[in-house]
Every structure is written in C-alpha cells, then in structure tokens.
Amino acid sequence: MRVLGIDPGLTRCGVGVVDVAADRRATLVAVTVIRTSPDLALERRLLTIGDGIEALMDEHRPDVVAIERVFAQQNVRTVMGVAQISGVALHAAAKRALPVALHTPSEVKAAITGYGTADKRQVQNMVAKVLGLADIPRPADAADALAIAICHAWRTPIATAGENPSAMTPAQRAWRAAEKAAGRSDAAPIAPKGAQGLNRRGR
C-alpha cells in the first residue's frame, strides 16, 4: 500500500509518502513541506499548496490519502488554516478518485508509539526508527505527515486481522483499544463520490 499523508497547514503543509508491505514494514518514498508566505493573499496561498499537493499525488500515485483531522484549539486562526488546507487536499484527492482517511492527532500518536498522549519528540523518533532513517525528518511538519501516513497504513491491516492480538504490533493493539474506547464509527476510509477503489498504479 502506498499512502500519501498530509499534515495540513497554511504556512507549512507537510506531505509524506510511504510504502507499507504486507508484513507492515514501511519504506520512505518522499517527504516535503510546502510553504507559503503570510504576505500572500489567501487565495494565492491555497493555490500554491493545492498545486503542490496535486503534483505530489500525480508523481507518486498513492493508493490512499491520509489527512490529520481538524480539532479544536485555542488559536482559531490556526484551525481555520488547517481546515482550509484540508479542504484543498480533499478536493485534490476526489478529483483523482482517491479514497481519503482522516485521523486525529491522538490516533496517530497511539498508532506510532502505543500512547495517545505521546509528545511530538516521541512520535518523531518513532517515525525515524520505523522508516530506518538516521535523522528525524525536519521540520516537524514533515515528520508529522509521515506519521499520519504510517498510522493509516498500519491501521488497514488491523481491519483484516480481526481480533487476533498476535497479528498486531503493540502500537497497533493500543491504537485498536483507543479506537474502541472512543467508539468511533467513522474510522473507515472515506471514498470520494464516484471512486471505484482501483489501484492507481494498476497492481
């Protein structure tokens, strides 16, 4: 499975692409941060990030897109920017009939580290370890995008592994428990209208 993960942001939008094998081994394909200046008009910033996301989708041809779910913060302006970029990413995915999954920060932390309350440094260290990288991807938005992609890829085999704990890693078991505790009914990937669920690379 090839997953394109997006950490949405108006000033810095992290985008990471990973390939995950059937044995859950993850391999880095690409990672970048699309930046825009606060001095630009909002529509130009959205266009710049949208064009960047679309170019990466077309270049790497992911099977699915995973995006961090918008959540409440004290900084309303930040939430608005995240929501706007999420909409741009959803639009780009829908144009390509790519399924989309939304994951909260706590879900991503639980999937990567086994703890839904892990700090950013712990998540970044685990991302580097999982991908076999000598250094943590910088800036943090890049590591976050990869964590979102890995979270979704690891979640997908869980759905097919049933309730067999031996088929899951400790982090995956923690993620499963967190999902059950939250009683989530919307955890499954969201297929855009008209999507056929086809593998974009013809496999």
Image (spheres, grey):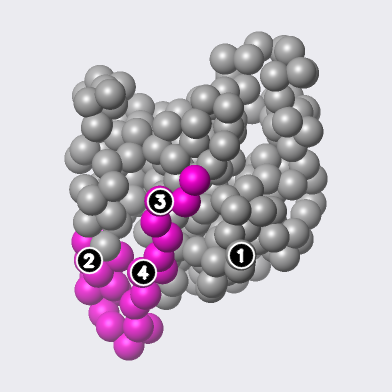
Residue bearing the label numbered 3: 29
**Which mark, residue 134?**
1
> Which mark lies nearer to you, 2 or 3?
3
Determine the image quadrant of residue 66: top left
Residue bearing the label numbered 2: 47
* Whole-number angstrom distance, CA of label 1 to CA of label 3: 15 Å
Write the start and end of the magenta stretch as one range. Answer: 27-51
* Whole-number angstrom distance, CA of label 4 to CA of label 1: 23 Å
Residue bearing the label numbered 4: 34
> Which mark lies nearer to you, 2 or 1?
1
Q: Amino acid at mark 1?
A: Ala
Secondary structure beneath label 2 = helix
Q: Earlier in the sequence, mark 3 or mark 4?
A: 3
Q: Amino acid at mark 2?
A: Leu
Q: Earlier in the sequence, mark 2 or mark 1?
A: 2
Query: For the point 57% across and 23% down, which residue is it?
Result: 157
Is disc 3 surrounded by few (<14), some (14 to 19) or many (20+) residues within 10 Å?
some
Residue 86 % position (x, y): 40, 53
